[in-house]
Image: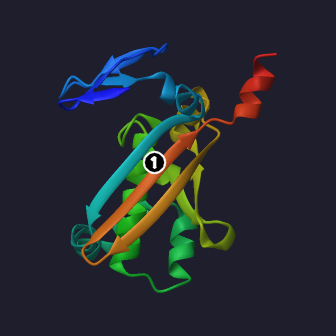
Amino acid sequence: MKVNKGRILKKNLRMKSGTCHYCGAIIPLSVNRHFEDFVAGVGVDLIRVKRVEQAYLRRPVRFMERIFSAREQAFLSQRSFSAAVLAVRFAAKEAVSKALGCGIGPVSWNEMEILPGISGIPTVVLCGKAGRVAQEKGISGIALSLSHDGPWGIAFAVAYRNQKEEAKGND
């Protein structure tokens, strides 16, 4: 493959390709084919901690009941939590809804639980409409990464399909 003035030129490539909407570069799509079989959706959300802190301070009880499930509230009440912890868990719910492919609206904040898993790794539990959306799309789980630093929090979610379960269904 040769690169010429920012464009990738096809030379002896036997694969389907697409074109970048911005620069016109040729993008080989077969590279992503296996990835698309496994990954059902990706979501990311970047949030200002101060924004969530202000919402919480205005109406703390209403905020907690609207955004977090009873299990999440129980977990958060067991430890002292900072505004950054609330913000990153809020961002996680946004990222999960994007990974599901529907965003907030069709699914409720409380239907996506962000709970501590093994070794503190955040675990996503879906219930209600969020669980049904995941089931309809063949999503078997969601991997989640959370981080916060200073005024920012970020969450990255990857909804994935279980390859072994799909193989059983195709027999």
- Label 1: element kind: helix
Percent of width and height locating residue 78:
56, 82
Instruction: Mark yes or no: residue 96 visible.
Output: yes
Q: Quadrant of the C terminus?
A: top right
Percent of width and height locating residue 46:
30, 58
- Dot 1 amino acid type: Val
**Image quadrant assignment for residue 9:** top left
**Image quadrant assignment for residue 127:** top right
Q: Residues within 10 Å of mark 1 (few under 14, many from 20)?
A: many
Q: Is residue 120 above or below residue 131?
A: below
Relative side of 120 to 157, left or right: right
Relative side of 79 to 60, left or right: right
Look at 58% across and 27% down and name the residue there. 136
Percent of width and height locating residue 8:
30, 26
Look at 51% across and 49% down and name the residue there. 111
Name the one closer to the observer, 6 or 45: 6
Look at 33% across and 67% down and name the residue there. 153
Q: Is residue 156 above or below residue 79?
A: above
Task: Name the residue beneath numbered marker 1.
Answer: 96
Q: Quadrant of the N terminus?
A: top left
Instruction: Mark yes or no: residue 64 visible.
Output: no
Name the one closer to the observer, 152 or 80: 152
Percent of width and height locating residue 91:
37, 58
**Image quadrant assignment for residue 38:** top right
* Way the structure is coloured: rainbow
Name the one closer to the observer, 18 or 42: 18
